[in-house]
Image (cartoon, coloured by chain):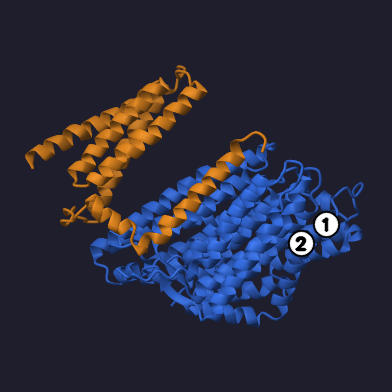
Amino acid sequence: MSGELDLRPLVPAIIVGVTGLVVLLAQAFTPKDRRAPSAPLSLTGLLAALAAVWLLASGGGRGAVLANAVSADAYSLFFQALLLGIAAVAVLLSPSYLRANGLDRGEYYALLLFSVVGMLGLVSSLELVSMFVALEIMSIALYGMAGLYRSRMESQEAALKYFVTGAFSSAFFLYGVALLYGVSGSTSLDRLEWAVSTLTTDSAALALLGAGMLLVGFGFKIASVPFHMWAPDVYEGAPTPATALMSAGVKAAAFGALLRVFGSALHALAGEWQPLVASLAVITMVVGNLAALAQGNLKRMLAFSSVAHAGYVLTALVASPGQAGEAVLFYLVVYGAVNLGAFGTIAALSREGREPLSLGDVAGMAERRPALAAALAVFLVSLTGIPVTAGFVGKFYLFNAAVTAGWVGLALVGVLMSVVSAYYYLRVVVAMYMRDPLGEDTWARVSPSATVALALSAVITLVLGIYPAPVLTLARIAARSLL
Amino acid sequence: MMIDAVLFYVFAAIAVASAVVVIGQRNPMYSAFALVVTLCSVAVIFGLLGSPFIAVLQVIVYAGAIMVLFLFVLMLLNVKREKDSPSRGQRTLSGVALALVTVLVLQAGAVLLRSRPTPAPDYDASTFEMAKILFSPHFLYAFEATSILILAALVGAVVLAKKEL
């Protein structure tokens, strides 16, 4: 038993967790007639954690510590920086939305920070029990956030649906962990890697069954078909900044853990799970995109689009190990920025409990709010994957990884489905630019903090589309540390 | 050995029978008490398997704490006897059928996987050994992170349940 107790890799998560406690206490000690400074406190905590990640990275990163339970390798530092950035943008989007909807409570920020603690743990765990606990922290905090809007039926429905399906998927995950423990006699990933590379025929079936169960558990979290049924209702019912965090952050964290488990620990079984993941990718892309076509509600449309994008990422996962790692990592950065922007635009316009959800609501937006319409257009064009935006570069690397690994058909389905997706994304852009506005502009003025968040997302989307090299290099370094 | 086998079959039978009572009862209170019996019988089976620690946990946590919570909720909400509904018999039948199918599938799986149940190697499942593993650096992160998990659950429950904050 190693006696090394190096807590440095946990410093970012500890900072975020302590900030959550401070936010709760600040709320308790603020007089009733005043507003607790929850958002500035949360933002400070997240930026401090980001600085801690930077310090860890400049110290060269660290391998596994805490008896191989947690690591601060380049891979987890990359994801931690991404997740903290996503959370910071979500915090920037929150105050104006919460105020406009009468939800301004410190608990929202505390839950947000706790869910970030879970995400950070998920991407840095090298051990399945730690991974499970982190997954649960993330999920449980998000159940609370989904149901925050208690006066709305949809929000209550979202919380309950998310909770029940989430608990169901956790059971699958845990069963998978138990079976893999049965195979390797340990819950740590390096022992698992060793065990599956020396499998006897007897335990091979057990290992496959365990891997399958884990895949189902992760499938729920990344909302891949057929485990996506909760996504549209939850994304629609949850407060919109929370939806932005779910679609960008949860997906990144879950893919981070998924890639670590399947791309690294279970790669000896790749021949068996690759066809499975490939078929998941195909049905996820097809069902997600076709269902998104039929949506009139913008939040639901974006929810199905996020299902479809899980499918695009899965196509590259099939190619792992290899080039897949960097493609997936880069795409998650792109996808995070774009989705924060798209959901953020909806959230920023929210006023008195209403938000622009139909095509009629955004019609003629370009005339009234040229900057905002341009930003939303950039995000939607990027989601489609049209050149000069980050979405194109991201998809290019994803499909390239699949083709290089010999999965040409898979990449073909992805490209075809991207063409289909152009219809429902560009429909919104057309409504904004070509149609006349309906009625008066009753939407909110965009608050300064939301402006910063949207501008940041838009700039990242454009810069990564034109000059992706620095982030790609980082993604490559991070993905290498996995092998 | 012989006495172990007898005890196993007796308590396994009790566990299954009371589990049937849990779903067969119309009064939710009786169901809850039947569940206590099931959980305690399973605890005895854990004891027979040489895991006294798990057996005690099963009684304290499940049969104790969680069941008390169930009973509190039942009493607070004043849940009434379930009303007669025409599909009741049908539901019981489909439940039994589902249970049988599950057992068959698991058996078939075991046969197909050619897994021969081997007795677990001699291991020390005492509380001391459990604690040594549980509090080792290997599980330190999971152990500490659980406190955040519980706190998040608590905050979430308050947010969802409290009328005015």
Which residue is rendered at x = 26% and y = 42% of the image? Answer: B55
Q: Which badge, 2 or 1, comes first in the chain's sequence? A: 2
Query: Considering only vertical position in the picture, is A439 above or below A200?
Result: above
State the residue at coordinates (29%, 29%): B37
* Residue B126 x, y percent position in the rendering: 22, 51
For the point 28% across and 61% down, the residue is: A183
Q: Which numbered disc covers residue A250? A: none
- A384 and A27: which is toward the camera: A27
Query: What is the letter of the blue chain?
Result: A
Disc number placed over residue A446 in the picture, else none: 1
* Dot 1 amino acid type: Val
- Which residue, as the protein is rendered here, is positioned at the far left? B2
Q: Please report the residue visible at 66 percent of the width from the left and 50 percent of the height from the top.
A: A26
Crowdedness near tag 1: few (<14), some (14–19) or many (≥20) residues, C-alpha within 10 Å: many
Give the crowd class for mark 2: few <14, some 14-19, many >=20 residues within 10 Å.
some
Residue B99 location, quadrant: top left
SS state under label 1: loop
Colour in which the image shows chain B = orange
Marker disc for residue A426:
2
Quadrant (top left, top right, bottom left, bottom right) of the C terminus of chain B:
top right
Quick one: A309 or B136, which is closer to the camera?
B136
Q: Chain of mark 2?
A: A
> In the picture, residue B122 is in which quadrant?
bottom left
As rendered, which of A196 and A407 lies closer to the eye?
A196
Residue A412 visible in image: no
Q: Nearer the viewer, mark 2 or mark 1?
A: 1
The image position of residue A110, as x and y in percent, is 61, 51
Q: Amino acid at mark 2?
A: Leu
Name the spot of residue A368 as percent of width and height, x first: 91, 58
Q: Secondary structure at mark 2?
A: helix
* x then y, percent, for residue A366: 88, 61
